[in-house]
Image (tube, rainbow, N blue to C red):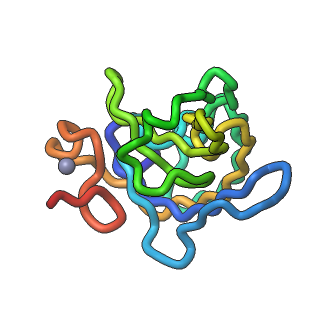
Amino acid sequence: MVVAQHKVVSIHYKVVDDDSDELIDSSETGDPMTYLHGARNLIPGLEQALEGKQAGDALEVTVEAADAYGEYSEDRVHQVPREALAEVERVEPGVTVVANTEQGPVNLVIVEVGDEEVKLDANHPLAGRRLRFDVSVEQVRDATEEEISHGHAHGPGGHHHD
Ligand SMILES: [Zn+2]
């Protein structure tokens, strides 16, 4: 069975920064990651590369920033008055705050704290980075109707409901 729309796929993966070789994430110490293919649960570049693969296949995929977590954009760096963060407990660099916007909650990282203004960065932490994945396909199965209607995989390595 090959990876295609509405298949549930389990993969082991390791992802590094393609420029620095810094290890970013790996599934090797735990269960494989299980996802519903074609439901945008993976970054687009990786999902495309897995199309047509089957259990036992191994692949190395390099994904440009634009097909991973996006280009780094200065437009996502904002200066706000300190009083806008009056309810935030610790206002210091590296702290993530959540802003509620019309598009839903957005994570912003505090990058600089001035006397009157605070600089916040809404770029994804991996924005602007070209990533290299080592992937092995462990299992491919049909999705259940419930999984298709939920838009994600259930079971070990997949989505858990409370
Ligand atoms: Zn569900």
Residue 104's place in the image compared with 24, above or below, is above
Seen from the viewer's position, the closer of residues 113 and 3 is 113
Which residue is at the front of the view, 60 or 57? 60
Q: Kindly give the residue lying farthest to the right in the view shown.
A: 19
Q: Quadrant of residue 119?
A: top right
Q: Is residue 155 above or below residue 31?
A: above
Q: Return the residue found at the far front.
A: 115
**Residue at x 40% of width, y 42% of height:** 86
- Note whether 155 is above or below 76 in the view shown: below
Give percent across and percent down for residue 34.
39, 58
Numbered label tally: 0
> In the visual, does 18 lie left or right of 47?
right
Point 33% across, 32% down: residue: 100
Can you see residue 4?
no
Q: Position of residue 84 (x, y in %)?
A: 43, 33
For the C terminus, the quadrant is bottom left
User: Residue 20: in sight, yes or no?
Assistant: yes
Q: Position of residue 142 (x, y in %)?
A: 29, 48
Q: Give the farthest residue toward the bottom.
A: 29
State the residue in front, 72 or 156.
Answer: 72
78 left or right, relative to 98: right
